Image (tube, coloured by chain):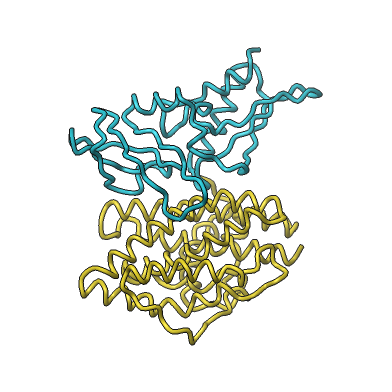
Amino acid sequence: MSDPREAVAAVVDPEIRVITIDELGILRSVDEDPATGRVVVTITPTYTGCPAMDVIRADIRRALAAAGHPDAEVRTVYAPAWSTDWISERGRAKLADAGIAPPAPAARGGGVVPLTLAVRCPRCGSPETEQVSRFGSTACKALWRCRSCSEPFDHLKAL
Amino acid sequence: MSELFDFTLALGDDALITAQRLGEWTSRAPEMEEDVALANIALDQLGAARLLLTYAGELEGAGRDEDALAYLRGDREFRNCLLVELPNGDFGMTMAKLFLLAAYQLPLYTALSGCADERLAAIGAKARKESAYHLDHASLWVKRLGDGTDESHRRMQDAVDQVWPYTHELFTADPAAPVDPATLRADFDAVVSAVFDEATLTRPADGWAPGGGRDGVHTEHLSYLLAEMQVLHRAHPGARW
């Protein structure tokens, strides 16, 4: 049997397949029940309606079964609520490499209208970019365009 | 317990019916980006609805899960406010409905996030972030259409006038609830006044205040919505994708 934490941490997000659930910050904990030895994984969704959660749960179970822990339990928690601030530095770099502009620090203080800092184009690095659509291909992304290189790109919305 | 069940069910029904209504726009929105936006907002509402209805089912303790509550109740058993069941109308009407709903849901979820019930607090903290985005999005459209052409202004004002009476039901006092809806009115008024001002829209006078949704007395529109939403589940009980 191999380390369950390692096995779960390597599971990739089914909608953004370049980043792991650990790097995305939705993997909250991996514990072993000392009495039964059963692995208990706790995850949290990016958005309440995230349709990838069922696939993520199945992928976690599959990864654990392959690592010798077939009897794992996957729990979903909602508090504390996920924030894009939980995406690791390595995760941000991977997103940028895949052409997805990583999020700015999440707005604090509960303001209704979040401040938007310049989003750099993940292809050419130009800060001359504009938002095309506030919503994108998945719940966590918005669609942007670079005015310098004209390429459209996804931007992970700060949350 | 029963009080908490009713409260949770009502919020879950608000979100569920909103999701179903917004979903009707899919492939019909005035532009591609808005199609994606409305579908995404519908998905957020559905996410909140699932959490709230699952919790309501547990509070009730009668073995009903989210699906039983969504698909196997008749219109008289739904507790959503009338505002969310009204037909979409034109795009301006849909934005007026979404804006006023979000201006209520944001302070509601924010207050819930600090309430004594741990489950509701967690749901509130999560949904609040999404609600803020909905409010922001709808506000931009209300301003753009209100302060747009003569025609867009006329239609936005008309939409606001038609929908406004249905907002009063949202703030019916309920001091025993985890969050008394009456306490949300000031936040709602502040946001709505600011956006209406910028949109050059006139806040409608308060008068007629239809209600009954929280008691299961709905407009005729809800039955048609439920018929479409529930038909598959009722025809094929327990079917799974």
What is the drawing colour of chain B?
A: yellow
Instruction: Decide: is A8 above or below B131.
Output: above
B177 relative to A105, above or below: below
Classify the position of the N terminus of chain B by image quarter: bottom right
| Nearer to the camera, B118 or A59 | B118
Image location of residue B104, percent across then percent down: 52, 65
Q: Residue furthest bottom?
A: B207
Residue A55 locus on image (x, y percent): 51, 35
Q: In this view, does B53 lie to the left or right of A59?
A: right
Residue A61: which quarter of the image? top right
Chain letter, colour cyan: A
Residue A147 image offset from top left, x and y in percent: 19, 39
Q: Residue furthest right?
A: A35
Q: Position of residue A64 (x, y in %)?
A: 61, 22
The residue under the point 58% across, 50% down is B125
Q: Is there any visible trace of residue B78 in the rendered image?
A: no
Does residue B236 appear to the left or right of A15 in the view shown? right
Residue sticking out furthest to the front: A109
Of residues B188 and B36, the one drawn nearer to the viewer in this rendering: B188
Total marks placed = 0
Q: Nearer the viewer, residue B94 or B203?
A: B203
Residue at the spot 50% in from the left edge and 47% down from the top edge: A49
At horizontal 65% and vertical 54% (from top left) the residue drawn is B114
Q: In which quarter of the image is residue A120?
A: top left
Residue B114 in view (yes/no): yes
